[in-house]
Each structure stands twice: as structure tokens, then as C-alpha cells.
Amino acid sequence: MTEHTFNQPLGGNEMPRFAGPGTMFRLPSSEATDEIDIGIVGVPLDIGASNRSGTRFGPRSVRNESVLVRPYGMYTKAAPFDSFQIADIGDAAINTFNLADSIKIIEAHYDNIMAHNIKPVTVGGDHTISLPILRALFKKHGTMALVHIDAHADINDSMFGEKECHGTIFRRAIEEGLIDPKKMVQIGQRATGYSSEDFQWAIDQGVRVVQAEECWLKSLTPLMNEVRELIGSEMPTYLTFDIDGIDPAFAPGTGTPEPAGLTSPQALEIIRGMYGTNLIGADLVEVSPPYDTSGNTSLLAANLIFEMLCSFPGCIRR
Amino acid sequence: MTEHTFNQPLGGNEMPRFAGPGTMFRLPSSEATDEIDIGIVGVPLDIGASNRSGTRFGPRSVRNESVLVRPYGMYTKAAPFDSFQIADIGDAAINTFNLADSIKIIEAHYDNIMAHNIKPVTVGGDHTISLPILRALFKKHGTMALVHIDAHADINDSMFGEKECHGTIFRRAIEEGLIDPKKMVQIGQRATGYSSEDFQWAIDQGVRVVQAEECWLKSLTPLMNEVRELIGSEMPTYLTFDIDGIDPAFAPGTGTPEPAGLTSPQALEIIRGMYGTNLIGADLVEVSPPYDTSGNTSLLAANLIFEMLCSFPGCIRR
Amino acid sequence: MTEHTFNQPLGGNEMPRFAGPGTMFRLPSSEATDEIDIGIVGVPLDIGASNRSGTRFGPRSVRNESVLVRPYGMYTKAAPFDSFQIADIGDAAINTFNLADSIKIIEAHYDNIMAHNIKPVTVGGDHTISLPILRALFKKHGTMALVHIDAHADINDSMFGEKECHGTIFRRAIEEGLIDPKKMVQIGQRATGYSSEDFQWAIDQGVRVVQAEECWLKSLTPLMNEVRELIGSEMPTYLTFDIDGIDPAFAPGTGTPEPAGLTSPQALEIIRGMYGTNLIGADLVEVSPPYDTSGNTSLLAANLIFEMLCSFPGCIRR
Amino acid sequence: MTEHTFNQPLGGNEMPRFAGPGTMFRLPSSEATDEIDIGIVGVPLDIGASNRSGTRFGPRSVRNESVLVRPYGMYTKAAPFDSFQIADIGDAAINTFNLADSIKIIEAHYDNIMAHNIKPVTVGGDHTISLPILRALFKKHGTMALVHIDAHADINDSMFGEKECHGTIFRRAIEEGLIDPKKMVQIGQRATGYSSEDFQWAIDQGVRVVQAEECWLKSLTPLMNEVRELIGSEMPTYLTFDIDGIDPAFAPGTGTPEPAGLTSPQALEIIRGMYGTNLIGADLVEVSPPYDTSGNTSLLAANLIFEMLCSFPGCIRR
Amino acid sequence: MTEHTFNQPLGGNEMPRFAGPGTMFRLPSSEATDEIDIGIVGVPLDIGASNRSGTRFGPRSVRNESVLVRPYGMYTKAAPFDSFQIADIGDAAINTFNLADSIKIIEAHYDNIMAHNIKPVTVGGDHTISLPILRALFKKHGTMALVHIDAHADINDSMFGEKECHGTIFRRAIEEGLIDPKKMVQIGQRATGYSSEDFQWAIDQGVRVVQAEECWLKSLTPLMNEVRELIGSEMPTYLTFDIDGIDPAFAPGTGTPEPAGLTSPQALEIIRGMYGTNLIGADLVEVSPPYDTSGNTSLLAANLIFEMLCSFPGCIRR
Amino acid sequence: MTEHTFNQPLGGNEMPRFAGPGTMFRLPSSEATDEIDIGIVGVPLDIGASNRSGTRFGPRSVRNESVLVRPYGMYTKAAPFDSFQIADIGDAAINTFNLADSIKIIEAHYDNIMAHNIKPVTVGGDHTISLPILRALFKKHGTMALVHIDAHADINDSMFGEKECHGTIFRRAIEEGLIDPKKMVQIGQRATGYSSEDFQWAIDQGVRVVQAEECWLKSLTPLMNEVRELIGSEMPTYLTFDIDGIDPAFAPGTGTPEPAGLTSPQALEIIRGMYGTNLIGADLVEVSPPYDTSGNTSLLAANLIFEMLCSFPGCIRR
């Protein structure tokens, strides 16, 4: 066996895939420390979701299915575990009875992660969690670029009178200056809304919105070339991936599925297309295990998280 | 066909069971009005739950499976739809992003129901909902007797720092004087707790606690005779039935199941044993459809709600 | 290996249980012939069912799960495959678009079975199928005794205007003289009906009706002693077992489940208690595989069919 | 909130999506009246189906999942609820024990709908239901054009000797002159048949048959341009959409799935491509909830029904 | 919070139940060390199973569902985490392609555990694993007493020619002198076998066999009094609990279910009845998660493992 | 009905699809005899699988779902049952406790099949089974060409120390000279590996590897033209199709799914593209029914097996 500098996923020839620690990719678990380059974090919140619940079990389930992921990308030739010190740094202890309190807990949790200069890759949980994460990252990085994959725009002003829940977060993030809307791209929005204004507010701020219809039957590699050109390689960039951006055929286990979305090859093209940006964090949200009877949505999510690791600047390709 | 004075469930020979309106027992839906004796109410809350979520779909699912319930009890000979004007009076519009706000919304919703002198039979939702319901009923009835079926005592002082969620409600209800603990009986508590004090606070207040172990292999009819003796036939009495009081073999679709609980015959014995008390309202909570793959937990719940109707004072037996 | 006179189930040490022929107990399949004592028959009808469908897949699914059944009863010491020539004689080719036509097809199918003096053990299919089976058996045996396990009485005069469907068959069977109501016992009826008359017609004809409530927490061996006394050992006796007689905890996969039914030990006691009667045929109906997510309802049904084989007169015990 | 002239779906900010009335899109329910432009109708029939059953629960399940559909098409900019008075006008009370009788009941049910000049949008049920619907519509509109999406041609002369069931209906419709075969297009047929004649009868009548293979990896917008050219904008045109036209990856919950079908983007292209024809009615059939473990087939169906509403002549785009 | 001497399960008020480490009861994970009194071990083997597979996921799934178990027994008043140092000591790295090799790996794994004087509580995995565990324990303890709960006797001489698999292990254990058959009790055996000899070999060696039929409708506390009398409080005693000893209504997720088994209250009575013996190890085997659609079989298993902890000698009751 | 020379699938108008024999396509079952041209064989092995188990139920489940397949290809116009004598020749009696022994049993089983000059079409079972099949075929045909569809290369040198299991077989097949690597094409490999060498060994031997990424959004008909050119029409050619080559959206029920795979249209293009080669056998492996909640993976597999029949040399097209 090769000598490794960094943490390695526990291999399938050392411990059968269906056993071993319940961490992401069967990596070592760790507190947040200065030695860690990238930390995998779970945020098991689902009380910010408006339709089906269940994403509270997302982190556990994605970790469970991540056992099949191996350390090397066969097509990209990326080797993230030879490039970075990566660890599973556990879960944020959200308050499942109180959304507003949970948003504060999450921000504090990421303040600590940022204090150790860890780049967080988060598995949700409903999409609400991206807001306190961005707030914490903003304190270190300032205004960020954002690539946002989702069936929905998540730019409602409020839902049921609430200003902070899974459908309002990117309006808040733009209003608070966390995100530069001119460096923000939304991909995969579709289906039905309350009015034509549903996507318009973002467009008016300068966000580029690429509806799902524009993606049908196309490789998204050209789009990602444009995205990288727009954002550049310097600006701190965050990637937020709502699994419902992908069609329910590929990702059935989610809370607000919409038909005719992205394919899983397109999802890979998008995440792989982030390589070349100054990616400083990413999240994968809205996997709802009770609606994922085969486990394959969690499995897809685990693979997308692996691809995220491969797109951080400095990831070796060999 | 007989002439009926009151609303009747839509019969299976008029409209196939798998069709027709999506109301409880396919009864007419109605606003709350003074003509209604008993109103079926849905409270689709699940953000007060500490483990699995999903009870937000409880009201819809129990209504769906209620189509199999017919209007007459074959063993009790009870005929509730010939005894009372019963309607499905719809759902409380809880705020799914805010538990504290939802608790207020629910209380106001039941204030309105009480203003019409309707006896509410509620389908949840998680157990949190019983607290605002009891608060509304207290304004009309004063301190009430309570029969509480549940795997858990729900008398924590707080959970994760919160004073009002599905595990604390009966401590609140006793503290606020809504319930007379000396006229309160808990049945079915079991399994594990944090310490021996978990059940003790209630016992110290005078509550009678009948652990599941005391119920194994026994008819509960004698127990219910004692319960009726304790409560009497005058005191306004509320029945709160957490489906997890029943063993997961009979009721798998719930969020915090505990092994070795009550059987469904015992559940019927308890509810039937309420006949003779001055029942003024009841609820059936904690059915979680995502964990109920056959639909049979919802079906059981619908039957238990039918049995509740049969136990209101004045229900004809023929 | 012992020399056997009769067909034997394919053993788990000859062919793994999850493989081999798709017949009941992995017995040889056969046309109906004079050599066969007992024939297992599938009748895949579900268009006589009033609520959930799916029993059309009952025969296939019960056969699939029957692979776990071995040839000897460990408690009864019964050895049916050493006592009788038993074969899987295939399915009746019902017309799935036409219930009335199917009823005729089934009767003709059993006329042929009776022409070979085969005792039929049938797996349904919805309960409608028992009527044409009884009609065919009547031609040979004359008026029969009947033991009927079911959550429902199945004695409606009509359903949705139809005289022959799964809820009317035993009224028809009594009216036509196929069954002597004074030698008929119904066990397990419960839950709700349209009026007190729902069970009364049968009682008025002399049928003994043992509601589920009378069975709770009791061994049914004493009841079966009474049943055998009532019927005697001479009168041709048919056993019809609707799986919904058993509680949905034990048998979730069925179309019109009712709570608080028989337990599976009680089901065994009933079938074992038929030994000593002049059993001339039996059926097991209403298993609906789409609602049986674990396969265990079909597995239970396969075991009940094995126990039926053990209760035919002449079955050796050793 | 805007003043609306017409019925509006109950919004997610007024009542959480998982609650509220069990009608399609949570619209008001109504009898058939002259005020209604488009009526949503359920026809819960499944005894015309030849393989898996379960579509009897289609209307209920599609309504349940329709709660996620909002009133405005984000890509088409269509606003059907600002264009038409739309209501859920309930279910046809089919006779689940008698297919021939049900076909008559359905025709009479639609005769009444047509008497009120309501354009029906139907959710099935198995495909048999389209025949009596077309018979009723023919009385008002005369011979119609037809766009038929399906994995199968449904032009058998008979099945198991029956002339009217889910595989024969379009032969009947052409023979009876309900449909002009030269204005009929079939899309998505594929897989296996009994002989090369299976599709030929329709082709011989002048029907255009577009097999699934011709659709692979293509936008169907050009095809729909041709379809609109063929049919024109005047001829009364009916759209019948069997969910099994779509690949089982996107629509697993159906009774006779065939591999390698249409994608859900193609399904949207087809229905959106109907805009410009004189659409006078539509149906969505063959959703079988017991085989739809995530609910997502019903959700897709609800979205397709929304898109149908958007394609009726006069639907505003803004 | 109280000061604790020993490891405590992570509490639900510190980290929501659906998050935190994937260990049993969310205990700390640890290597085997001399400080540990009782070690929880996973053995994810399923290639020794003869019917349905899937128990390889047993350890992971039981750990997942164990999050609901709290540290104190409400009825027994047992406080195992205040009595012993308990840790999750991880999984044996079995060779999933080679049963014979796996049996050796397991024995070596437990040799190491015994070298640290840890009492092992194992979660399987199929029942084969008990044989190498007993071999390792024998080296320390000599011949042991055994209490064996199971639907099957597991005393075949061979299966498909193999001497060591899940149906032969207790014949091997007796032959090798690991177990004293006169101090061995089997409970719950039932259903069908190949011949009357299936249970006889054990009986001939002096084993007490309590068939399921002898347990129906009875408390098993008296039986356990007899068991304790037979075994005494000195002899090293092992408890092996096959989840299929329990009826499939309570424990559907298993590979060779048999109808009419023990109830979950009886399961508790048996394990609680072990208190007073010199218990030196225990296992819980044959949970097969793919057949456990609600997760409740794993949940029951986790509770049974908690009860095992409570029955080790020295467990405090308060 | 036409007179047929060869065995025909039992038609849906003779026996409803949900009934009849449990054989593939409801063909006659048969021993291996010289009259059979193509034999369908089941090999129910899953102990060679490294992640999820369950493929032991593959043969039964694919047969169950094959009832929907009719005898004629509507697009290819192929009529295999008019071209060849085809029968279901049953299952290999593998030893489920011993992988090495099973590999020998399978080889012997296929030796017998080859002795009758039957071309085998096999349904697995995990991919291990292809190795002993190739060994048996090699004795008759010598070195073969191979087309291999799979998410994985299956060319590990060993797994967990074992030389023969589902991830090593094609390295063994090339080493043993069963396959000419220069006439071998692998299609669909993707996702993650242990290092860049994972695919390299095969490439170094001359195998053509077509990663999934090269297939995205493309018809594979041109690729298959190249494949036929490479292999020619003379060389004995084997087709091995691992269902996980197809994307989990289309084929969720498998043990080691990987995202972003082939579509089912591409799967058909590949198999149809084999027509013109000298196909002498084929297999379809890795369907795992416990993870296939709708049955549609098995249904897809049954269709792929039908398409395999259509691609044997001499299959009539009309």
C-alpha cells in the first residue's frame, strides 16, 4: 500500500463496504482543527422545508451510501485525497424545534470552522442552511460569487410571513451583500410559480438565470465555460447544489421535486466545470431519505460531494 | 335508503371507496358552525417532533384511509352518525417554519371552534398540538380530566432548551391548571428514559401511570372501569391518543416508536371504555405516513377516530 | 434420501430456496389428473374487490414465498407429502375484464378438477372466487358445511347493484343451498358496518358468528372443539380463509384490512382444528402483494396453505 | 393579494402544502355548472387493465401530489387560472365490479358535463375510460382529431374476447367515427407486440405513428409543429396521455411499463405543442399509485395536467 | 449535568437524534482496550444465510435506529451506563467472498476482544457468526451455558454439504464442547422441518426445547425462572438471539421468517430474565434491513441490545 | 391462431399476464436437450458481490416481470420465437455458502448445456457467474470476442484477497485466454476508482474501453457499427450485460450503482447492434430485487433479454 500524506477513505479491501465507520467516505472523523483543508459537515435541519420533510436524515443517509465512492475520479483523473487533508468534522447541533435559533447555531458552527481556515463542504438538510453558512463565510471572504443549482429560485421575499426559510435565502444573501448578484448564476429553475415575477427579482439584480428548458438535451460544459469566464479564477466562489435541480428520475428522494430537470451527467458537468474557479465552499442539500426507497438519491449525492472535492483549487489530476 | 337527520359518510355503494371527496369518512366538509356537534379537525404540524418527521401528512393520510370505515360499530352497536351532526371542518393553517407561532395559531383556531360549541376530534400532527387545543378548551370547560395513551410521558421540563414541543406538553398542561393531575391517567409508557425521574414528576402530581408492562397479555376493560370511576361522568374529559402507545407491529408509521406496546384490541378497549365519561374532545396524533408503507397505520387511526365518535356522551347504541 | 411414494417439495439442499420452479412449495406442476389427491390451484382474480386491488398477483406471490415451507409440521407432526399425492395444477384463466364471465370460467375450471376427484386447495384472488368453487364442489358433494375466517361477513345482498362480488358470496351460497347455514361458522368478523343487520341475516339463517372481540386474548382450540362437534366428521366441509381475518399487524398485504383481528397463532389453531372434519377443499384469499412490502403476508399465506394440507382427513402424524 | 375573477388554487402561504382540501391543485370543488370553463374529473377505474392494477387510486393520488403545482408556468408564461374558470368537479361513480356498466356510467357522466359546456380534463383510471369520454364529446363536437401519447397503440380488436378494455379503445373510436384517423397522431409506441400488424391497422387507417425510437435524443418541438399543421387550429382536438408513454425512469408508477420511452421534457414539449390547436378536452391515464413508491409519478401527472390547462385555446401568456 | 464515570450515549438534547456519530447508542467508538467492560461489535456477514440475504447491513442499520434508546430502563430501573464502561468497538472485517475464511477472521477478532477481557455484545450478521464467537469465548470461559432464541433449531448436520453455516452452528458448538447441552435452552422453534428429527438431536443431547406453541398467550417470566434455576448464577452463560424468534409482525425485516412466533413483550421477558445468570456475552442476529421498510425491526433490535446490557451481572438498578 | 414450429410464450389472451407458469416469458420449461437452440438459464448467486446483496433473487424476479414481453420486436421487426427453439432450462443449483464451489458448479452446469449445443442466455446473479460460463463456452468455441456493458471494469487482480469474485472476472478471463482482449469492448465504465490504473490494465491488453462520459447525449449506433467491424461476423462472440451499466434512474435495483450511466435507449442500441456478430451466448447480471421497489429494473432486464434473443444470428426480421 502507498504511503499517504493525508487522510484516506477506508478501502473496500480493508473493511467490507457495508461496515466500518459511519463517516463520509469512511474518512476519519475529527474536531475542526487547523490541519484540515476541507471539512465535511452535516447540517440535519428540515424545519425550513415547505412541503415534504425528512431532510433531517440527509447527512446520515448520504454518509451511509458514500461507502461506494472510491478516492480517484476515473474520467477527471482527480485525486482529492492526495491533494488535501479532508476529514468528516461531524454535525451542527441544530435546534429542531426552532428555525430561527437553528440559523444562529449554524452560523456559529461555521464561524468556528472558518476560524480554523477549513473549507466546508456541507450535506443538508433543507436549503435554509446555506444562508447562515454564507453569513459565516462572508466574514472571512467578503462578497462571494455563487453558482446555484436548483429547481427553484429561492428568492421569495417571505413564506408564510417568515423571512428566513428554504425559499427565501438567496434574496436575503443578495440583500445582505453576501453574494454579488452579477457573479451569481442559477441553473435548473423550472415548472410553476406564483407569477412571472418569481424569477424576475434575481434577474433584475443581475443574476444569470438558466432555466431547465435551456438545458434540455445539451451538454452543459459550454455553459460552465461561460460561468468560469463570468466569475473568474480569483473571486471567492461558493457552490450550492439543491438535489432537486436534478430530475426526479435521477433523484427521487427530495421534498419539492419538479419534473423535467437536469440529468445526472449534467450535474457532473456543472460541478466539474467549477474547477478553475476559486471555490471556497460548497453544499449539497434537500436529500430526503424517506422518499428515497432505493437509497440511490443519497448515493448520487455522495458522488456529487466527491466531485465537489475534485473541483477545489489545487486538486491534483494525474 | 333511510332518511337521515345528520350528515352521513358517503357510502361505498354510491361512490367506490377509492374515490369521492378527500374528507374524513367522506363526510361533508364545512366551516365551523353552530349546527355541528362534533368537528373533525386536521392539524398538520410536525416541527415539534424530535426524531423522525412526517406527521405533517398525517391528516391527509388518515382521511385517505378512512374511506373503509362504515357508520355503525358492529360490536358496540354504536351509531354516531345517527346521534350527532358531524362534519370535517378542515385544517388549521399552521406556520410550518415557526413552532411557537403555530402553537398560537392552533389555539386561535380552536377558540373559534369552541365559539361554535363544537366538540373537536383532531387528527395530528405531532403531539405538540394537544397543548394549544387544551388551552382553548380550558377557556370553556375549566380544568379537565385527561386520559393519555402514549409510549412516552411527555412531561419533560424542556427539550433542547424549548419549553413547548412534543415531549413537554403535559407538564405545561398541569402547570397551567388545564388538567387536574389527580384526574389524569397515562397508559402505555415504556422502554427507556434518561433517569427514574422521567415518569416520577407526573406520579408526584397525582397522575396514575400505567406502564405498558402492566398491560401485557391483559384485557384493559377492568382498567377502564377504574378510570371511569376515578374521573366520574361529570368532569369534562379529554382523550389524547398518541399512536405510538400502540406497538409498532400494529402501528409502524410513527416517529418515535418503542417496542412492546399496547395491542390494537387494547386500544379499542381503552377508547370504548371512555363511554360513560363526559368526553368533550379527543385527538389522535403522531401518525407519520412516510414510515407507513402499507397505509395500515393511517387505517388504524381512522378506526380509532371512529371509536372516539362512538364514545361521546349521547351516542346511540342499537 | 428416502424413497417417496408421492411428489415432494424440492428441498433447500438440492436447489437453493431462492431458485427452482415457481410452483407452490416447489412441487411438480401438473395438469389435473386422477392420480392427484390434492391440487393447488391459483385463481388470480381481483376485479371483485371493492377497495384496494392487487390480489391478482396473490397466487404468484404466495408461490414465491412458499419456498421456505418444509414438508413436515414440527408441532403437529403432520406429514402431508407422505400422505397424499399433491401437485400444483396451475391457474384458472380468468377473464380480467369481466367478473361475471370469470365466475363462469372458474366454475368450469373446478368442474374439471372435480371430474378427476381432486380436492382443491386454492390461493386467490379476491373472495369472489369461493362462490364458483362452491358451486362446482356442490355438484359432487351436495350441501356442505363451511368454516369461514374473515374480517367481514360477506353476506351483503348486493354491492353497487351487483349480486356476485367479494362481499355477497356467502348470501348466494346459502340461498343456493350450497352451504347448510346450521353447519356454518364465521370467525373474526369485526369493525364497522352499515347497520346492525350486517351480521344478522347470517345469524337468522342459523350461522354461528364469532366476532373478533370474542377471540381476543384467547386460545381458539376450545372453539374449534365446538366447531368439530357441530359439523361432525362426516359432512363434506369446506374451509375458506380470508387473510383479512388476521390482524393487519400479521397480514398487512390485503385489500380491506380491519384493525384488531385474529393473531397468526389463532389462525394456526383454527386450521389445525379442522383436522377431524371431512375437509374436501379449502381456499386462502385476499392476499394483495402490492401492499405487502416485506413479502411476509404471502409467506404467512403459504404456511396457512401448508397447514390446510395437514388437516385433510388421512394426513399422517408421526 | 390580487383580485381574481376566477377560482384560484389555494396558495402555499395561506395553507401549508401538506394540508387543505384534497382537490386538484386545491381548487374549489363544484358540481358541473354552466359557469365552469374547464372541469377536472376523476375516473377511478382499473378493471380494464391487463397487467398490474391500482389505477383506481390514480385520481386521489394525483390530487394529493398536485399541491406542489403553482398557478403560473415559468417558461411558457401561461396563466390558466387567470384565463378560465376551472374547478374540480369530482369523480365518476364507476361500478368497480362491471366494466361494461362502468363504460356506460362514464359516458352518461360526461354527457352531463357536456350539457354544461365544460371542457373536461380527466385523470384516470386505466385507458379504457377514454372511449366513453370520446363518445360523449362526439355528440357535441362530431368527429375529432386526436393526439395520443402511449407506449402502446391500444388498437387491438379484442383482448381475452372483450371488445372494450384498455387495449382496444382507439380501434373502437376510429370504427365508430369518433376520431378521424387522418387527424390522429400516436407518439411513443415501442417494445414488443404479437406481430407486425400490431401497429399496422392504425397506419392503414391513415394514423401517423411516431415510435419511441424516432423520438430518442430529440426535441419533439419540430414534431409538434408538424402535428399542429396536420390538425389545424379549427378541428376539435382531444389529447389523451397515457403516462406509460413516458419512460419508467420518469414515471415508474404504472401498470404496463415499457422500457426506452419518452422523457419528461419531451412530455412537456408535446403538451405545450398542443397550444394552437382547438383543444376541447384531455386526459391523463394509467398512473398506478401502488407502484409509485415516492409519489413522483403522481406529481409528474399533476404537472402534465397543469400543462394541459395551459394549452387550451385562449390561455393567457404574460 | 451529572458527572459520569463511564461512557454515556450522546443525549438527544445535546445533538438531535437524527445526527451525531453512527455508533451504537451514539457511544464513543474505541479500539478494544482493557478499560472496556462491555464492547458492542458488528459482524456484517450474510453469506451464511440460506434464503433472503441482506443481514450484512444489520450492524449499520441497528446502529442507525439505536439513536432513540435512552440510558435508563423505565420498568427494570436498570442503568447499564452507570454500571459498566461500554463502547462501540467497531466491526469485524469479514471476507464477504469466503464464508470459511470469515469464520476464521471472526474467531481471531474475538480472540483479541477476549484478550482485553471485554464482554462482547454482537450485532449480526447471519447466525453463522455465533459459532466463531463461541469458539473464542470457550478459550477463556470453557464450556458455557446457552440460551438460544430462534424460530429454528440451527442443528442441521450440514446444509448443501457445508458443515458451517447459519443452520448448523449449534450442532457444531455442542460437538466441540463449547456448550453444555444440559445447560442449553432453545425457545421459539416452530413451523416446518424436514422430519421429526429436526429438533430431536438437540433433545437427545439434553437440550431443553421450548417450541413457540408452548409460549403462545403466556408470560415467559415463569419459564425464565426455570431457566435461571437450570443454569445457575455461576456458569458462564451466553445469550444468542435470532430476531426471527420473534413473530414477523414485530420483526418483519429478517431472512427466514416463520409465522406465529414470540411477541416483543416475550422477547423482553426472556432477556430481562437473564439477569441473575453469569452472562458473559450475547448476540442479536439476522436483522435484514432490505426487508425492514419502516426501520422498526432494527429499532426493536437496538432495544433488545439495550436490554442485554441491563442483564449483565452487576448492572445497577435504582 | 397460427401454427408454430417452436415454443411460444404463453399469450396474454390465453392466460392473464399476472398468472401462468413462472418461467421466462412464460415459455415451456425443459431439461437441456438437443432440440433447444437457445436456453434461458438462471444463476441465482449473490455471494460474489461486494456491496448490496440480493441478486440471488434476480432470476425469479426477472422471470416474474417478463410476463409483459410479447414475441415480436415492434421496431426491429425481429421474431425470435419463429426463428429458434427457445426454452427456460431452469436454474443452476449453486452452493450459496461457498463461492469457489459455486463457480465449479456453474461451470459443470454449462458444460452440460454446451453438450447439447444450446446457446445460453443467462440471468444472474452477480457478475461472478460470467467467469465459469466463459470457461465452459471456451471448451467448445475457443477464444471469444466479448462485448461488456458495465459501470465497472471488473478487472481487479483480487478483492479482499480473493481472485474470483464479481470485480475480478475479466482479468481472469483474459489471463486464461478465454477472451481475446483485442476483440473486447467495454462500454459504460465511470465514476470512481482506486487509481488511474483501474482501467489501464485492460487498455494495456488491447481492450477498447468506452467510458460513460463518451456516451452521454449520443446514439450508440455508430459505436456499435465500429464494434461489429472490430469483431467481425465470424468470431464467436459473447455479450455480458451488467445492469449497472445503465443509469440508476432507469435501473435502480442493483448492488453497486454508479451515477451518470447509459440510458435504456442506449442499452437497446447496444444489444440491437450485436445483430451481425456471431453471438454464441449472453448474460444479464446484477439485478437486485430488494432494491427494485417498483419491479421495473426486472422488467427492463426481461426486455433486454428479449432483445438479446433478437440478436442471435439467424433471427428472422419481417
Image (cartoon, coloured by chain):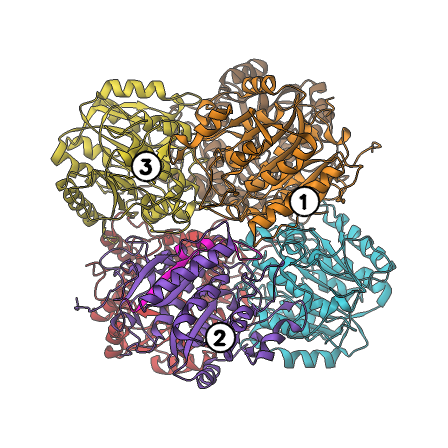
Chain colours: A cyan, B brown, C yellow, D red, E orange, F purple
- Inspect this view and state whether residue F294 appears: yes
Helix, strand or loop for disc 3 = helix
In the rendered image, which quarter contains the C terminus of chain C? top left
**Label 1 marks which chain's residue?**
E
- Residue A290 coordinates in the image, percent (x, y): 57, 50
Q: Amino acid at mark 3?
A: Ile
Q: Is residue E243 left or right of residue A25?
A: left
Q: How many marks?
A: 3
Specify whether residue C159 is painted magenta: no
> Which residue carries the number 2 mark?
F179
Crowding at dot 2, Cα within 10 Å, few <14 / some 14-19 / many 20+, comes out as many
In the rendered view, tell whether residue B55 sits above or below residue F119.
Answer: above
Mark 2 touches mark 3? (CB < 8 Å) = no
In the rendered view, tell whether residue E185 sits above or below residue A303.
Answer: above
- Residue A199 coordinates in the image, percent (x, y): 64, 69
Residue at x 37% of width, y 61% of height? F41
Residue at x 25% of width, y 43% of height? C87
- Residue A99 coordinates in the image, percent (x, y): 72, 49
Residue F139, numbered label: none
> Which residue carries the number 1 mark?
E108
Magenta region: F36-60
Crowding at dot 3, Cα within 10 Å, few <14 / some 14-19 / many 20+, comes out as many
The Cα–Cα distance between marks 1 and 2, rounded to whole angstroms, is 40 Å
**Label 3 marks which chain's residue?**
C
**Label 2 marks which chain's residue?**
F
Q: Amino acid at mark 2?
A: Ile
Q: Amino acid at mark 1?
A: Ala
Helix, strand or loop for disc 1 = helix
Mark 1 touches mark 2? (CB < 8 Å) = no
Residue at x 33% of width, y 66% of height? F115
> Which residue carries the number 3 mark?
C305
- E179 or C153, nearer to the observer: E179
